[in-house]
Amino acid sequence: MSPERGFLPQGDPCRELPAAFAPWEELAAELPKRLLTGTLRRAARALPLLDPAPLGSEGELRRAMLLLSFFGHAFVFESNPPAERIPLPLALPWCALAERLGRPPVLSYASYALDNWRRLDPTGPLAPDNLALLQNFLGGVDEDWFVTIHVAIEARAAGLLAAALPAQDAARAQDAPRLEALLTAVAEGLEALVAILLRMPERCDPYIYYRRVRPFIHGWKDHPALPHGLVYEGVAAFQGRGQRLRGETGAQSGIVPAVDALLGVGHAADPLRAYLAEMRGYMPPGHRAFLEELEAAPSLREAVRELGSGQPSLVEAYDECLHWLEHFRATHLEYAARYIHRQSQASAANPTELGTGGTPFMAYLKKHRDETARHRMR
Protein backbone atom coordinates (compact mmCIF):
# COMPACT_ATOMS: atom_id res chain seq x y z
CA MET A 1 0.00 0.00 0.00
CA SER A 2 1.43 3.38 -0.99
CA PRO A 3 0.17 6.85 0.04
CA GLU A 4 0.14 7.93 -3.61
CA ARG A 5 -1.57 4.95 -5.24
CA GLY A 6 -3.23 3.01 -2.42
CA PHE A 7 -3.52 -0.64 -3.44
CA LEU A 8 -2.64 0.07 -7.08
CA PRO A 9 0.94 -0.59 -8.22
CA GLN A 10 3.25 2.32 -7.44
CA GLY A 11 4.12 2.70 -11.12
CA ASP A 12 1.80 2.27 -14.08
CA PRO A 13 1.44 -1.46 -14.91
CA CYS A 14 3.84 -3.25 -17.22
CA ARG A 15 2.39 -3.30 -20.74
CA GLU A 16 4.58 -5.88 -22.49
CA LEU A 17 6.71 -8.86 -21.51
CA PRO A 18 10.22 -9.55 -22.88
CA ALA A 19 10.50 -10.95 -26.41
CA ALA A 20 10.83 -14.54 -25.17
CA PHE A 21 7.18 -14.35 -24.13
CA ALA A 22 5.89 -13.13 -27.50
CA PRO A 23 3.52 -16.13 -27.88
CA TRP A 24 1.65 -14.98 -24.77
CA GLU A 25 1.50 -11.37 -25.94
CA GLU A 26 0.29 -12.43 -29.37
CA LEU A 27 -2.52 -14.54 -27.94
CA ALA A 28 -3.46 -11.71 -25.57
CA ALA A 29 -3.83 -9.31 -28.49
CA GLU A 30 -6.09 -11.81 -30.28
CA LEU A 31 -8.10 -12.92 -27.26
CA PRO A 32 -11.38 -11.09 -28.10
CA LYS A 33 -11.25 -12.35 -31.70
CA ARG A 34 -10.45 -15.89 -30.58
CA LEU A 35 -13.44 -15.87 -28.25
CA LEU A 36 -15.64 -14.43 -30.98
CA THR A 37 -14.66 -17.20 -33.40
CA GLY A 38 -14.58 -20.02 -30.85
CA THR A 39 -10.90 -20.76 -31.49
CA LEU A 40 -9.40 -19.78 -28.14
CA ARG A 41 -9.10 -23.29 -26.74
CA ARG A 42 -7.35 -24.53 -29.85
CA ALA A 43 -4.91 -21.61 -29.77
CA ALA A 44 -4.20 -22.09 -26.06
CA ARG A 45 -3.46 -25.78 -26.48
CA ALA A 46 -0.98 -24.89 -29.23
CA LEU A 47 1.03 -22.50 -27.06
CA PRO A 48 4.64 -23.45 -26.38
CA LEU A 49 5.45 -24.25 -22.76
CA LEU A 50 7.20 -21.13 -21.46
CA ASP A 51 9.04 -20.95 -18.15
CA PRO A 52 8.28 -17.71 -16.28
CA ALA A 53 11.36 -18.09 -14.04
CA PRO A 54 13.44 -15.51 -16.01
CA LEU A 55 10.87 -12.80 -15.29
CA GLY A 56 12.49 -10.63 -12.67
CA SER A 57 10.59 -7.45 -11.95
CA GLU A 58 7.37 -7.27 -9.97
CA GLY A 59 5.73 -5.55 -12.93
CA GLU A 60 6.66 -8.37 -15.32
CA LEU A 61 5.41 -11.01 -12.90
CA ARG A 62 2.09 -9.23 -12.51
CA ARG A 63 1.77 -8.79 -16.28
CA ALA A 64 2.43 -12.49 -16.85
CA MET A 65 -0.06 -13.44 -14.12
CA LEU A 66 -2.64 -11.17 -15.74
CA LEU A 67 -2.18 -12.81 -19.15
CA LEU A 68 -2.27 -16.39 -17.89
CA SER A 69 -5.32 -15.62 -15.75
CA PHE A 70 -7.20 -14.18 -18.72
CA PHE A 71 -6.16 -17.15 -20.87
CA GLY A 72 -7.28 -19.60 -18.20
CA HIS A 73 -10.72 -18.07 -17.73
CA ALA A 74 -11.20 -17.63 -21.47
CA PHE A 75 -10.30 -21.29 -21.94
CA VAL A 76 -12.73 -22.48 -19.27
CA PHE A 77 -15.67 -20.25 -20.22
CA GLU A 78 -15.26 -19.91 -23.99
CA SER A 79 -18.34 -22.09 -24.50
CA ASN A 80 -20.81 -24.22 -22.59
CA PRO A 81 -20.24 -26.52 -20.91
CA PRO A 82 -17.15 -25.01 -19.28
CA ALA A 83 -13.85 -26.85 -19.68
CA GLU A 84 -12.98 -29.04 -16.71
CA ARG A 85 -9.22 -29.13 -17.37
CA ILE A 86 -6.60 -26.48 -18.08
CA PRO A 87 -3.94 -27.66 -20.57
CA LEU A 88 -0.33 -27.91 -19.50
CA PRO A 89 0.98 -24.86 -21.48
CA LEU A 90 -1.34 -22.70 -19.38
CA ALA A 91 -1.45 -24.64 -16.13
CA LEU A 92 2.27 -24.95 -15.36
CA PRO A 93 3.33 -21.32 -15.82
CA TRP A 94 0.10 -20.05 -14.27
CA CYS A 95 0.67 -22.02 -11.09
CA ALA A 96 4.35 -21.07 -10.98
CA LEU A 97 3.46 -17.39 -11.22
CA ALA A 98 0.73 -17.74 -8.61
CA GLU A 99 3.21 -19.27 -6.17
CA ARG A 100 5.73 -16.47 -6.69
CA LEU A 101 3.06 -13.81 -6.18
CA GLY A 102 1.44 -15.49 -3.18
CA ARG A 103 -1.98 -15.82 -4.82
CA PRO A 104 -4.06 -18.75 -6.16
CA PRO A 105 -3.97 -19.66 -9.88
CA VAL A 106 -7.24 -17.97 -10.79
CA LEU A 107 -8.26 -14.56 -12.13
CA SER A 108 -8.34 -12.35 -9.06
CA TYR A 109 -9.20 -8.68 -8.60
CA ALA A 110 -5.49 -7.88 -8.57
CA SER A 111 -5.06 -9.09 -12.16
CA TYR A 112 -8.49 -8.07 -13.45
CA ALA A 113 -8.38 -4.50 -12.13
CA LEU A 114 -5.35 -3.41 -10.10
CA ASP A 115 -2.77 -4.39 -12.75
CA ASN A 116 -4.96 -4.02 -15.83
CA TRP A 117 -4.99 -0.37 -16.86
CA ARG A 118 -3.16 2.37 -18.68
CA ARG A 119 -3.59 6.11 -18.82
CA LEU A 120 -4.68 7.55 -22.17
CA ASP A 121 -2.83 10.74 -21.30
CA PRO A 122 0.30 9.45 -19.51
CA THR A 123 0.54 12.69 -17.54
CA GLY A 124 -3.15 12.81 -16.66
CA PRO A 125 -5.07 11.59 -13.61
CA LEU A 126 -6.19 8.07 -12.77
CA ALA A 127 -9.81 8.99 -13.48
CA PRO A 128 -12.46 7.06 -15.43
CA ASP A 129 -12.21 9.34 -18.46
CA ASN A 130 -8.43 8.85 -18.70
CA LEU A 131 -8.23 5.08 -18.21
CA ALA A 132 -8.34 2.10 -20.57
CA LEU A 133 -7.84 -1.60 -20.04
CA LEU A 134 -4.69 -3.43 -21.01
CA GLN A 135 -6.57 -6.69 -21.51
CA ASN A 136 -10.16 -7.62 -22.31
CA PHE A 137 -12.15 -10.77 -22.79
CA LEU A 138 -14.71 -9.76 -25.45
CA GLY A 139 -14.01 -6.05 -25.19
CA GLY A 140 -16.39 -3.15 -25.62
CA VAL A 141 -17.44 -0.04 -23.74
CA ASP A 142 -19.25 -1.87 -20.93
CA GLU A 143 -16.37 -4.18 -20.07
CA ASP A 144 -13.83 -1.35 -20.07
CA TRP A 145 -16.02 0.96 -17.99
CA PHE A 146 -16.88 -1.72 -15.43
CA VAL A 147 -13.20 -2.26 -14.66
CA THR A 148 -11.90 1.29 -15.02
CA ILE A 149 -14.49 2.54 -12.51
CA HIS A 150 -12.93 0.12 -10.03
CA VAL A 151 -9.43 1.33 -10.90
CA ALA A 152 -10.47 4.95 -10.40
CA ILE A 153 -11.98 4.06 -7.02
CA GLU A 154 -8.72 2.38 -6.00
CA ALA A 155 -6.74 5.45 -7.06
CA ARG A 156 -8.99 7.85 -5.17
CA ALA A 157 -8.86 5.65 -2.06
CA ALA A 158 -5.12 6.27 -1.66
CA GLY A 159 -5.65 9.33 0.51
CA LEU A 160 -8.04 7.75 2.96
CA LEU A 161 -5.87 4.63 3.21
CA ALA A 162 -2.84 6.82 3.88
CA ALA A 163 -4.75 8.44 6.75
CA ALA A 164 -5.61 5.13 8.43
CA LEU A 165 -2.42 4.31 10.34
CA PRO A 166 -1.80 7.96 11.37
CA ALA A 167 -5.39 8.06 12.65
CA GLN A 168 -4.71 5.04 14.80
CA ASP A 169 -1.53 6.72 16.07
CA ALA A 170 -3.53 9.83 16.95
CA ALA A 171 -6.07 7.70 18.79
CA ARG A 172 -3.32 6.02 20.81
CA ALA A 173 -1.83 9.42 21.64
CA GLN A 174 -5.26 10.78 22.65
CA ASP A 175 -4.68 13.60 20.15
CA ALA A 176 -8.30 14.57 19.49
CA PRO A 177 -7.69 17.47 17.03
CA ARG A 178 -5.38 15.39 14.84
CA LEU A 179 -7.71 12.39 14.99
CA GLU A 180 -10.63 14.57 13.94
CA ALA A 181 -8.67 15.99 11.00
CA LEU A 182 -7.69 12.52 9.82
CA LEU A 183 -11.22 11.15 10.15
CA THR A 184 -12.47 14.14 8.18
CA ALA A 185 -10.01 13.18 5.43
CA VAL A 186 -11.31 9.61 5.51
CA ALA A 187 -14.92 10.80 5.24
CA GLU A 188 -14.07 13.08 2.31
CA GLY A 189 -12.30 10.19 0.61
CA LEU A 190 -15.29 7.89 1.07
CA GLU A 191 -17.61 10.56 -0.31
CA ALA A 192 -15.40 10.76 -3.41
CA LEU A 193 -15.50 6.96 -3.82
CA VAL A 194 -19.29 7.05 -3.79
CA ALA A 195 -19.26 9.75 -6.46
CA ILE A 196 -17.10 7.57 -8.72
CA LEU A 197 -19.16 4.44 -8.06
CA LEU A 198 -22.33 6.33 -9.01
CA ARG A 199 -20.88 6.75 -12.51
CA MET A 200 -21.02 3.00 -13.20
CA PRO A 201 -24.36 3.14 -15.13
CA GLU A 202 -23.06 5.85 -17.48
CA ARG A 203 -21.36 3.33 -19.76
CA CYS A 204 -21.92 -0.11 -18.27
CA ASP A 205 -25.37 -1.48 -19.08
CA PRO A 206 -26.76 -4.20 -16.76
CA TYR A 207 -27.94 -6.37 -19.67
CA ILE A 208 -24.53 -6.28 -21.38
CA TYR A 209 -22.65 -6.73 -18.12
CA TYR A 210 -24.60 -9.82 -17.15
CA ARG A 211 -24.36 -11.53 -20.54
CA ARG A 212 -21.00 -10.43 -21.96
CA VAL A 213 -18.78 -9.37 -19.06
CA ARG A 214 -19.77 -11.43 -16.04
CA PRO A 215 -19.62 -14.98 -17.47
CA PHE A 216 -15.81 -14.87 -17.82
CA ILE A 217 -15.03 -13.84 -14.26
CA HIS A 218 -16.67 -16.72 -12.43
CA GLY A 219 -14.48 -19.19 -10.60
CA TRP A 220 -14.68 -22.93 -10.09
CA LYS A 221 -15.81 -23.19 -6.50
CA ASP A 222 -19.55 -23.59 -5.98
CA HIS A 223 -20.01 -23.31 -9.74
CA PRO A 224 -22.94 -25.58 -10.70
CA ALA A 225 -21.29 -26.66 -13.97
CA LEU A 226 -17.93 -27.42 -12.31
CA PRO A 227 -18.85 -29.46 -9.23
CA HIS A 228 -15.37 -30.97 -8.97
CA GLY A 229 -13.46 -27.78 -9.64
CA LEU A 230 -10.77 -27.46 -12.30
CA VAL A 231 -7.87 -29.80 -13.06
CA TYR A 232 -4.53 -28.10 -13.78
CA GLU A 233 -2.73 -30.53 -16.07
CA GLY A 234 0.85 -31.35 -15.17
CA VAL A 235 0.90 -29.55 -11.80
CA ALA A 236 2.41 -32.13 -9.48
CA ALA A 237 1.32 -30.39 -6.28
CA PHE A 238 -2.34 -30.91 -7.19
CA GLN A 239 -1.92 -34.62 -8.02
CA GLY A 240 -4.56 -34.48 -10.73
CA ARG A 241 -7.27 -33.37 -8.31
CA GLY A 242 -9.71 -30.63 -9.23
CA GLN A 243 -9.08 -27.32 -7.50
CA ARG A 244 -12.02 -25.28 -6.25
CA LEU A 245 -11.18 -21.58 -6.42
CA ARG A 246 -13.37 -18.49 -6.19
CA GLY A 247 -13.83 -16.12 -9.09
CA GLU A 248 -12.89 -12.47 -9.44
CA THR A 249 -14.86 -10.09 -7.24
CA GLY A 250 -14.54 -6.62 -5.81
CA ALA A 251 -14.64 -8.32 -2.40
CA GLN A 252 -10.95 -8.99 -3.05
CA SER A 253 -10.25 -5.25 -2.80
CA GLY A 254 -8.78 -4.11 0.49
CA ILE A 255 -10.56 -0.74 0.65
CA VAL A 256 -13.76 -1.62 2.52
CA PRO A 257 -12.06 -4.11 4.88
CA ALA A 258 -9.51 -1.40 5.70
CA VAL A 259 -12.23 1.14 6.53
CA ASP A 260 -14.14 -1.44 8.57
CA ALA A 261 -10.96 -2.19 10.51
CA LEU A 262 -10.15 1.48 11.05
CA LEU A 263 -13.64 2.41 12.27
CA GLY A 264 -14.17 -0.77 14.28
CA VAL A 265 -17.17 -1.85 12.21
CA GLY A 266 -17.94 -5.43 13.13
CA HIS A 267 -20.30 -7.85 11.43
CA ALA A 268 -22.14 -10.68 13.16
CA ALA A 269 -21.30 -14.14 11.87
CA ASP A 270 -22.92 -14.94 8.55
CA PRO A 271 -21.90 -16.58 5.25
CA LEU A 272 -20.80 -13.24 3.77
CA ARG A 273 -18.45 -12.54 6.67
CA ALA A 274 -16.89 -15.97 6.23
CA TYR A 275 -16.65 -15.39 2.49
CA LEU A 276 -14.97 -12.00 2.94
CA ALA A 277 -12.43 -13.59 5.27
CA GLU A 278 -11.76 -16.21 2.59
CA MET A 279 -11.21 -13.43 0.04
CA ARG A 280 -8.11 -12.31 1.95
CA GLY A 281 -6.33 -15.30 0.46
CA TYR A 282 -6.89 -13.91 -3.04
CA MET A 283 -5.36 -10.52 -2.24
CA PRO A 284 -1.67 -9.70 -2.79
CA PRO A 285 0.25 -10.55 0.41
CA GLY A 286 1.12 -6.91 1.08
CA HIS A 287 -2.54 -5.95 1.07
CA ARG A 288 -3.35 -8.71 3.54
CA ALA A 289 -0.53 -7.53 5.79
CA PHE A 290 -1.83 -3.95 5.76
CA LEU A 291 -5.30 -5.11 6.83
CA GLU A 292 -3.83 -7.24 9.60
CA GLU A 293 -1.82 -4.26 10.87
CA LEU A 294 -4.97 -2.14 11.02
CA GLU A 295 -6.92 -4.87 12.78
CA ALA A 296 -4.20 -5.43 15.38
CA ALA A 297 -4.26 -1.82 16.61
CA PRO A 298 -6.18 -0.65 19.69
CA SER A 299 -9.75 0.43 19.05
CA LEU A 300 -10.04 3.83 17.38
CA ARG A 301 -13.78 3.67 18.00
CA GLU A 302 -13.25 3.52 21.75
CA ALA A 303 -10.85 6.46 21.57
CA VAL A 304 -13.50 8.49 19.74
CA ARG A 305 -16.05 7.53 22.38
CA GLU A 306 -13.72 8.62 25.20
CA LEU A 307 -12.47 11.83 23.61
CA GLY A 308 -15.78 12.78 22.03
CA SER A 309 -17.36 13.88 25.30
CA GLY A 310 -15.04 16.86 25.30
CA GLN A 311 -14.96 17.37 21.54
CA PRO A 312 -18.36 16.63 19.92
CA SER A 313 -17.00 17.46 16.47
CA LEU A 314 -14.77 14.38 16.73
CA VAL A 315 -17.84 12.16 17.03
CA GLU A 316 -19.38 14.01 14.09
CA ALA A 317 -16.30 13.28 11.97
CA TYR A 318 -16.42 9.60 12.94
CA ASP A 319 -20.14 9.36 12.16
CA GLU A 320 -19.57 11.10 8.82
CA CYS A 321 -17.17 8.29 7.89
CA LEU A 322 -19.86 5.76 8.74
CA HIS A 323 -22.43 7.72 6.73
CA TRP A 324 -20.36 7.51 3.56
CA LEU A 325 -19.32 3.90 4.19
CA GLU A 326 -23.00 3.01 4.52
CA HIS A 327 -23.72 4.99 1.33
CA PHE A 328 -21.00 3.07 -0.50
CA ARG A 329 -22.45 -0.24 0.67
CA ALA A 330 -25.98 0.85 -0.22
CA THR A 331 -24.87 1.79 -3.75
CA HIS A 332 -23.14 -1.54 -4.15
CA LEU A 333 -26.29 -3.29 -2.96
CA GLU A 334 -28.36 -1.36 -5.51
CA TYR A 335 -25.98 -2.42 -8.29
CA ALA A 336 -26.03 -6.04 -7.15
CA ALA A 337 -29.80 -5.94 -7.54
CA ARG A 338 -29.74 -4.11 -10.87
CA TYR A 339 -26.80 -5.84 -12.55
CA ILE A 340 -27.21 -9.39 -11.23
CA HIS A 341 -30.41 -10.19 -9.33
CA ARG A 342 -32.87 -8.67 -11.82
CA GLN A 343 -30.89 -9.89 -14.81
CA SER A 344 -30.86 -13.43 -13.43
CA GLN A 345 -34.66 -13.42 -13.43
CA ALA A 346 -34.70 -12.85 -17.19
CA SER A 347 -31.82 -15.02 -18.38
CA ALA A 348 -31.45 -18.74 -18.80
CA ALA A 349 -27.94 -18.33 -20.17
CA ASN A 350 -26.36 -17.32 -16.87
CA PRO A 351 -28.90 -18.71 -14.41
CA THR A 352 -27.39 -17.96 -11.04
CA GLU A 353 -27.88 -15.36 -8.36
CA LEU A 354 -24.49 -16.21 -6.94
CA GLY A 355 -21.85 -13.53 -6.99
CA THR A 356 -18.90 -14.16 -9.29
CA GLY A 357 -17.04 -15.38 -6.22
CA GLY A 358 -19.67 -18.12 -5.90
CA THR A 359 -21.79 -17.03 -2.96
CA PRO A 360 -25.40 -15.79 -2.49
CA PHE A 361 -25.25 -12.14 -1.64
CA MET A 362 -28.40 -10.01 -1.48
CA ALA A 363 -29.57 -10.67 2.07
CA TYR A 364 -26.09 -10.42 3.52
CA LEU A 365 -25.19 -7.23 1.66
CA LYS A 366 -28.28 -5.63 3.22
CA LYS A 367 -27.24 -6.91 6.64
CA HIS A 368 -23.71 -5.50 6.34
CA ARG A 369 -25.10 -2.14 5.21
CA ASP A 370 -27.43 -2.03 8.20
CA GLU A 371 -24.68 -3.09 10.61
CA THR A 372 -22.56 -0.21 9.34
CA ALA A 373 -25.34 2.27 10.10
CA ARG A 374 -25.79 0.88 13.61
CA HIS A 375 -22.20 1.79 14.51
CA ARG A 376 -22.98 5.51 14.44
CA MET A 377 -22.57 7.12 17.83
CA ARG A 378 -25.32 9.72 17.34
Image (cartoon, grey):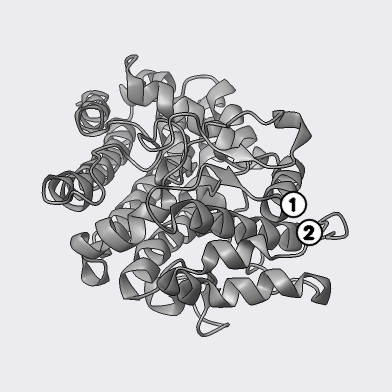
At horizontal 77% and vertical 70% (from top left) the residue drawn is 21
At horizontal 47% and vertical 44% (from top left) the residue drawn is 253
- Residue 98's spot in the image, x, y percent? 69, 44
Judging by the rendered image, the residue that carries numbered circle 2 is 49
Is residue 204 in view? yes
Q: Residue furthest top?
A: 269
Going by the numbered disc 1, the residue's amino acid type is Pro
- Residue 42's spot in the image, x, y percent? 58, 65
Question: Along the horizontal axis of the image, is 358 left or right of 116?
Answer: left
The answer to whether 4 is drawn above or below residue 365 in the figure is below
Please report whichever mark, 1 or 2, sits nearer to the chain's N-terminal start: 2
In this view, the residue in front, 251 or 298, is 251
In this view, the residue in front, 64 or 2, is 64
At horizontal 28% and vertical 54% (from top left) the residue drawn is 194
Mark 1 to mark 2 CA distance (whole Å): 8 Å
Callout 1 touching callout 2 (CB < 8 Å)? yes
Other residues around mark 2 within 10 Å, as few (<14) / some (14–19) / many (≥20): some
Circle 2 sits in a helix, a strand or a loop, which is it?
loop
In this view, the residue in front, 150 or 135, is 135
Circle 1 sits in a helix, a strand or a loop, which is it?
helix
Is residue 9 in view? no
Going by the numbered disc 2, the residue's amino acid type is Leu
Judging by the rendered image, the residue that carries numbered circle 1 is 93
